[in-house]
Amino acid sequence: MPRWKQRQGFHGILRVATMLLAVTTATVASRTAFALIRGGEGNSPVHDPGWPKGAAEIINNPARIAYWVGPPYGGGQWHAECRGDAKVFNAVLADFAKVDVKTRRLVLHDGVKNSFWLNINNDPAKRAAAKVDWVFMVWQPTSWEHLRKSPADLNPIDARDADKGPPAQIDVYTGGNLRWSDVTVPDGIELIDERLEAHGFTLADGVVLEGTVIDLATRQPVAARMQLQRVESKPKGERHYTVVSEAVADAQGRWVLKTAPAAAHRVVVEADGYVPRVVGYAQFDDQPGWHSYHCGLSRAAAVSGRVTDDAGKPLADVAVRLGDVVGSGDGRYQSPQEYESKTDADGRFRLDQVPIGSATIVLRKSGYCRPGLGQPITAPAQDISLSMTKSARVQVTVDFAGKQRPGDYIVEIKPEGGEVVGSWGGSGEIDAKNQISFNDVPPGRYVLQGHPNPSTANRISKPLVIDLKGGETIEVTLSAK
């Protein structure tokens, strides 16, 4: 039976469940904070009816030592981690050339790969047993299409593939069992060489980071600065960033950093007069490799406006945040600092360090809500008028009717009629008193259901429909099944 691993961000397991139903425990409004990753060891056959023709032969190749599906952005991306020599790999490439996709990409790397599934926390003591020579990736097409339409800050789709459909890709590593000089690449496969020697470096340079920086408006190079920041997770979930190395771009906007240290990092690019930008995250180990980070920077723009209630009265202390930030003519623009502000006594807010481009305004204030995915804007923008309505609160008590309570029990709240993009929903575990509260719920009709975690279909409770009005708190009892 496959396993499910639950993780937050790009490292750290939160929960392992051994049944086919697992539920996130974060209460969220329309977006899931955690990702469930299913996978397993060995090469026992696995199947997905959505795979393109020819993918099954590669995923279920005897060289596979592990597989997993479900990246941090959502499900539908399958990975087969394999180990073998050039003879085995040539046979895999022959099958790869037949996979029914428009893009078949082969990416060449130095060193060896650490198996994500066999060593999810990148434990140095486990690396020898978790070495991988190549990884095959293929999309479940419907999942790829769903993610392609998602907001910019959740969309993992490579711009190269947006018009061609989901690609299939093999990442091959030349520092292990596989000698690249013995490999033959068939026609119909796009080869991308990311080895150090292909970019003018040597294995002695270790982990090399290289990038270029341009001005998004003029498309001219920028003499920017790059900071390599170590990412450290704290006990309460927050992260701390420490600058460990820096590099300065030349007049052509090019910067290079050699021998980057082993750890989890983020790459930040900044320049005077521009909004700083996070251009990537990476987990480096002791394996040599070349990593490319090309980006554009935007001049700073201001976004300002006013927030009122339904009666037109100003709302103070409203948290104003920008999401889905996209630089003009560019992709996602993530800043090292959040695009956040708070309204003053007159309901007014202002953010000064915003890149020129598009964004979405999201509001948050206890006791109020603004239904939907947020207000789209184009920066710079001023005198934006926004309103919030009073929200509802639901306190749920689960009645086990004298039966023994399961260790973990989840209650879910969903809109009546089903979830759609922009609707509000959430879930969470009950406390020691068998209770859970859902706060700041938009008015409307909702369905409550509960079940143990992990669970099976016959343990899900009968739906309970509730009608919520703004400003009210209701208490309900949900009967466990």
Image: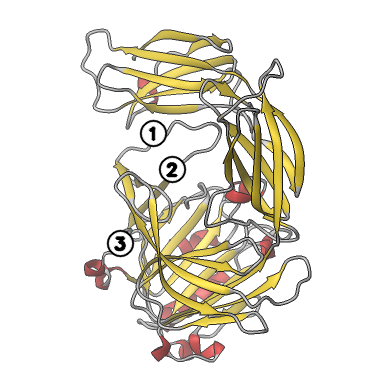
Between discs 2 and 3, the one toward the N terminus:
2
Q: Amino acid at mark 1?
A: Thr
Q: Amino acid at mark 2?
A: Phe
Mark 3 Cα shell of 10 Å, populated few (<14), some (14-19), many (≥20): some
Judging depth in this view, the residue of 409 and 211 nearest the camera is: 211
Assign a secondary structure to mark 3.
loop
Residue 11 vs 225, above or below: the answer is above
* Disc 2 from disc 3: Cα separation: 19 Å
Residue ID at (39%, 75%):
133
Residue ID at (43%, 51%):
9
* Disc 1 from disc 3: Cα separation: 24 Å
Q: Which residue is mark 3?
A: 119
Q: Which residue is mark 1?
A: 25
Q: Amino acid at mark 3?
A: Asn
Judging depth in this view, the residue of 464 and 288 nearest the camera is: 288
Q: How many marks?
A: 3
Q: Which residue is mark 2?
A: 34
Residue 285 vs 402, above or below: the answer is below
Q: How is the image coloured?
A: secondary structure
Q: Are marks 1 and 3 in contact (CB under 8 Å)?
A: no
